Image: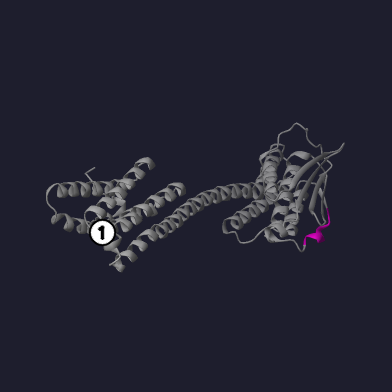
Amino acid sequence: MGYKLFPVKYGFLPYVFLVYLMFPIIVLINETGVKAVIGWMLLFLFFLSYRKLFFDPPMSSYMGWLILQFIIIIIFTYFYQPSLVLLGFYCANFIGWLRNSKMFTISMILFVFSSILPVILQYEMLSESTYLVVMVVVMIISPFGIHSMSTKMELEEKLNEANEQIEVLIKREERMRIARDLHDTLGHTLSYITLKSQLVAKMTKHQADPQIVTKEVNEIERTSRIALKQVRELVTDMRVLTIAETISDCKGILNSANITLEVTGLNRCENMTSMMQNMISMCIKEGITNIVKHSRATHCVIGLSQNNLGIEITISDNGIGFNRDTKLGNGLKGMSERLELVEGSLNFFHYETGLSVNVFIPIVERKFGGT
């Protein structure tokens, strides 16, 4: 990389401000002897500090270069030309960009002192120039405006970073949601197709009645069409699941598995929000999936009830249940994760014959604005 007088990120701005160094240069051209030599040395140091401050040095160095500018301005104002107090606009710019509140306060105190001291020392000369006094006042105030702008920019930068992080989290959550939806909507359907396929294979092996085999194959075809429909709905996000439609689909699947279905409290679901309907539908689907796959049941009951606290869904069967130490599968884990999002709960109750899955979803309209 080649030598850079100023950082590239600032563009031409640092070079533009160099124009104002023409004022001390004009003053020094008219000086002679030791005073001229010291003046040019001070001007070089001032330019060096100006350049260094653009490279964002450590805070200790930053303050050191600023204090050097203060000292040079006082010397220029008192020994050379009172109007050179306006070189303080350089300092004002760098003070304004200080994001550390403590350092900003210290710098402002030193800046005000270095700006007012020359005015006091050269009062007789400066009092004749009202314009110069006004400019000194503007110079002292300007760091506050710059600091306010830099603080706002910092907040916007942090906000942008936060928005980027939120976007990443949203994408991650969306991926998890899609994975859960795919499992909850397609998992039980594909599992059912697998079971039916295995049944057809066994029937074919034992040379069962062709009509019965044909019936089972037709059932597989019907179920696969349901799966295709579910995929289309997930991809296009055309609508949310409703409880009535879900129970209707589950009834067909349970009938195919020779499991009877009893539903109670369905009329309580008519006024539920779409989010609540979707949540309950997913839980019911997962519960029915587990019954078909693992329970060996012949009867299933889905009960829905609602009170001021929330909605309770009970999915019971008369099957073999499962061991208390059995780990939850992906489906039940997905159901549990969904319920955690709305502070719901998932419990299992074991009986001598069968298992009851109890799902509780608190009323969330008041907390989440009905979404």
Q: Nearer the viewer, residue 143 or 299?
A: 143
- Magenta stretch containing residue 268, yes or no? yes
Q: Residue 207: give x, y in percent of width and height.
A: 71, 39
Q: Nearer the viewer, residue 5 or 78?
A: 78
For the point 22% across and 59% down, which residue is it? 19
Q: Nearer the viewer, residue 156 or 269?
A: 156
State which region is magenta: 263-269
Is residue 161 toward the left or the right of residue 38 in the image? right
Q: Nearer the viewer, residue 143 or 288?
A: 143
For the point 30% across and 60% down, which residue is it? 123
Q: Residue 98: give x, y in percent of width and height.
A: 40, 50
> What residue is shown with label 1?
82
Is residue 280 toward the left or the right of residue 320 in the image? left
Task: Please tell me whether residue 192 is drawn above or below residue 231 in the rendered image.
Answer: above
Residue 178 in sight from this viewpoint: yes
Task: Identify the colour scheme used.
Answer: one colour
